[in-house]
Amino acid sequence: MPATSLGFGRRHDGDDGLFGGLGPDGAGHRPAAAGMGLGHGPALACPAGLGADRRGLRRLGGRGRRRQGRRHRLPGLLPGGLWRGDPGPGPAPPAASRPQGAGGHAGGTGPAGLDRLPARGGPHPVGRPAGRRHRYVGGRPGGGARRRDGNRPPGGRRLHRPYRLGHRHDLGAGGRAPGPGGPAAAADRRRRRGGRLAVPRLKEGEDMLKRIAARVLARRKADPAAATSRARGGFVQSSLAGHSALGLGLGALIYIVCLSGAVAVFADDLSRWEWAGTPETAALAPEVVDQALAAGLARASAQAGGAEKVTGLYGLLPRPDWPHLAVRAYTPAGAVTWRAGADGALADTPSDAWTDFIGEVHMELSLPGVWAGLAVGTVGIALLSLLFSGILAHPRIFRDAFALRLTGARRLGLADLHNRLSVWGLPFHIAITVTGALFALASLMILTVAQVGYKGDLARAYAPLSGAQVAADAGPRPLPPIALLQAQVADPTPGAARISRFYYVERPGTKGQRILLDMTRHDGLTQGDRNYFDGEGKLLAPLGFLDGPVGMRVYGASLALHCATYGGLPVRLVYGVLGLALSIVTATGFSIFLARRRDRGRPLPRLERAWAGVTWGVPLAATVSAAFTLAPDLAREAVYLWSFWGLVAILPLLSLAAPTGERASRTLRLLLGAALVLLAGAHAARHGTDLPAAALVVDLVLALAGAGFVFSTGLVGHRARTLAAQANPAP
């Protein structure tokens, strides 16, 4: 019996359908007729009238040719088992036009005898979607679907994979007629072969993974540089993702700590500006200092209801870079500060220093107790992590240390400014961050040391830092003269004079008082040491910042390194510029993230406006709080606290009302510039010709900074005229 072939695909003339021969002698319908057309040789018999209606096997509209056979019934099969073109009810065609099926496709005689194609166990039921198992070949002009083996049948068509058809229709895997023994033997062979064909595809998946791994290894061996580059790219992306997430989470707190630290560096200079109405004196006689301290203790005792309720007395002594005397008393109700004149007389009205408040914002974020150290320490660790992750996320950061694109796209300009300021100040940033985190977390670290090394005894753990102790005794005793204390710690080396910076008394006015006197020298990084005395004024022991153990020397040097208490004004200027640069790095990092989101079509307009409120709202809040120093009755820590943190919280919310982030930024810059100019003008007008030179310099700096912010908004000057011309073109 000649070989039988059954193919599903596209006809030579473009019609989709079934193609097969019509008998052993090839007589019958032409290949162009719709229906079962010519295959690769003598093939199946075809029902009569199969090619009478070519429209019946045309491709259904709206479906791709590649998937047509898998989703549709065979187009030639109608409900009821009739082929398109079948004469339907009525006299049956001659038997000759309805040959018997062959090759397992026999369907009987009569109009309904050949309307079913047999499945594995029998014929297709009427209306069965017989095309689910067929894959139409074609779908591309002139070629059909690709086939892995590359075989192309005659006529330019690629056939589907043979097992998709042959095993379903009792044909061989290659479309051949059943072998010897007929259909029963073929079924038996299929059963024996089923175990091999039904094996799970796990081994095939393993083989595929092995092939993929082999290709990857071969690629790496062929080009190791490319593999290393891809690995480095993944590491850089991971570092950048961590850098962004950490900056977004703590960006606002880091910005506040950095900016307040840049201002607190100039605490002595700003204190002279703040106390411009108090006469300056670089040195006072020890007797005058004793008089001012005794007067402050008496006032605090009267206000607190007894000397025993005054827990501490602090005297900030005059020196060349801060020529003032201040006395502060600590009571259960809080701290009270008085300014003293050149004669030692205290001012009638106490006042709190705004510079002390800014220092507390930097060191404690105005939080109480251990929460302050925990919050600021977390900020310090986060900032240190940002510095190192930023270096890892930019492999070319040192190579591009001087690349600055300020005239191109805004995001590129911000990125260059961010990276350049980070690189140029990297040693300073690391030193300040490490020492700041160390001081902020000192209480937590000492608590851990006490639990591990001293069985929870905090007093023993604090002993190296707290100095020699004095037993409490409530009996009254006057304060010892400061001249007696200074004489015991004077440096005998010629030309190595030491200056007292501050004086602190615990439990003042009692027999159990302990006195701390800080002595400063100007010939090293660690400028001063702290000396403790008992109630009678007898020296107990220095703390050891100068000549003590290595750990105490490192701690003392770290204090000076972080607070810029060495080198005088030039060092403070360098610290101020680099601290301001670190604040700009923090602000631009967040802005780069927002600009990148906008460039990628996923902007965050509300967050842009809120961040503008944080960036320019923090310096504006500091300026407004500093303005209360001009009113003596309002120069209180509570006023500074509420005005600063209130504006820091409110301004980002008010910025949400702006149409864009740029508009919010311009508005706040304009307000900040105007506030700085007004503050400088009001301060100069209040003190008039008695304004000291140091305070006058501060006023000039504030006025220039304010004018710069105003001009940066584009509301004055050439840029304002340009914007106005664009908004109102000439007719």
Image: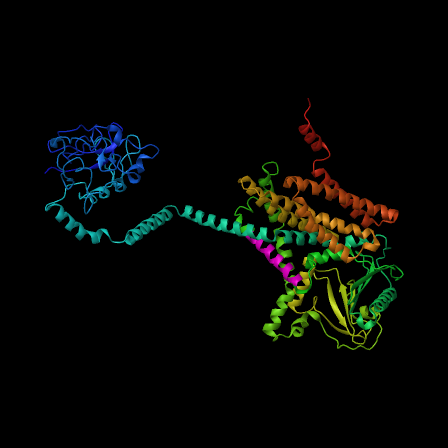
What type of secondary structure mainly makes up the magenta span?
Answer: helix
Vertical relation: 61 (above or below) 342: above
Please indicate, yes or no, whether residue 564 appears anywhere in the rendered image.
no
| Residue 60 percent coordinates (x, y) | 31, 33
Please indicate, yes or no, whether residue 325 appears anywhere in the rendered image.
yes
Task: Name the residue furthest front.
Answer: 90
Task: Name the residue furthest top.
Answer: 731
Left or right: 519, with 101 as reference point? right
Residue closer to the observer: 217 or 668: 668
Q: How is the image coloured?
A: rainbow
| Residue 383 percent coordinates (x, y) | 60, 54
Residue closer to the observer: 152 or 692: 152
Q: Quadrant of the C terminus?
A: top right
Left or right: 723, with 63 as reference point? right
Residue 376 lies within the magenta run: yes
| Residue in the image at 81% along x and 68% along y | 486
Q: Quadrant of the N terminus?
A: top left
Left or right: 341, with 2 as reference point? right
Vertical relation: 519 (above or below) 510: above
| Residue 129 percent coordinates (x, y) | 27, 41
Image quadrant assignment for residue 724: top right
Magenta stretch: give its range: 371-389
Image quadrant assignment for residue 439: bottom right
| Residue in the image at 68% along x and 31% along y | 723
Residue closer to the observer: 385 or 348: 348
Vertical relation: 103 (above or below) 472: above
Residue closer to the observer: 182 or 696: 182
Q: How many marks?
A: 0
Residue 105 lies within the magenta run: no
| Residue 218 percent coordinates (x, y) | 34, 48
